[in-house]
Amino acid sequence: MVTYTDSGTQNKKLGTFKTLEDSHEAMRIIGQLLADFIVEERAYVNANLDDFTWEGASVHAIDENGKKLGWGYSCTNMESALEKKAELLKKYPCVVIRDNATREETSYCI
């Protein structure tokens, strides 16, 4: 069974991978199906992150060319986001904190 956990930490059924065979090859195929599902789900969520991020704050570093780096941090509250910002400003010229509830972004540059 494939499930996901919503923001209320409740599991939701998405589907079931099932086979009538019990061979090693059949189990490998089921494992590959699940792996493909996980890869596609992650790509979809990352491409549509605003649809899945409602709480806390996101922190992203900006490089010397003004480009947002391809990674970031999710923080449960603004206090931890500000701590992460201070840490990142030691290495990067700018950091952006986004309040996920309001979608407002604040830039901090040195």
Image (cartoon, rainbow, N blue to C red):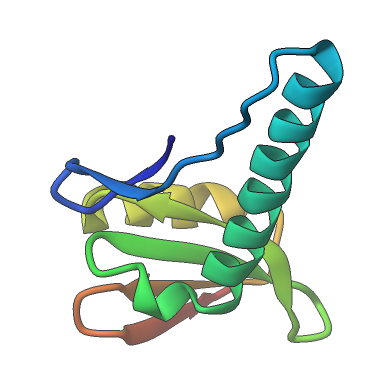
Residue at image coords 52%, 67%: 45
Left or right relative to 85: residue 89: right
* Quarter occupied by residue 18: top right
Name the residue at the left extreme.
8
Question: 38 and 25: which one is in front?
Answer: 25
Q: Say if 11 sits above or below 98 in the image.
A: above
* Image coords of residue 65 (percent x, y): 83, 84
Name the residue at the front extreme.
20
* Image coords of residue 21 (percent x, y): 69, 21
* Image coords of residue 4 (percent x, y): 36, 46
Question: 108 and 15: which one is in front?
Answer: 15
Residue at image coords 25%, 52%: 6
Do we see residue 89 in this rendering?
no
Left or right relative to 45: residue 70: right
Do we see residue 43 in this rendering?
yes
* Quarter occupied by residue 1: top left
* Quarter occupied by residue 72: bottom right
Q: Quadrant of the C terminus?
A: bottom right
Question: 98 and 82: which one is in front?
Answer: 98
* Image coords of residue 54 (percent x, y): 25, 69
Question: 98 and 8: which one is in front?
Answer: 8
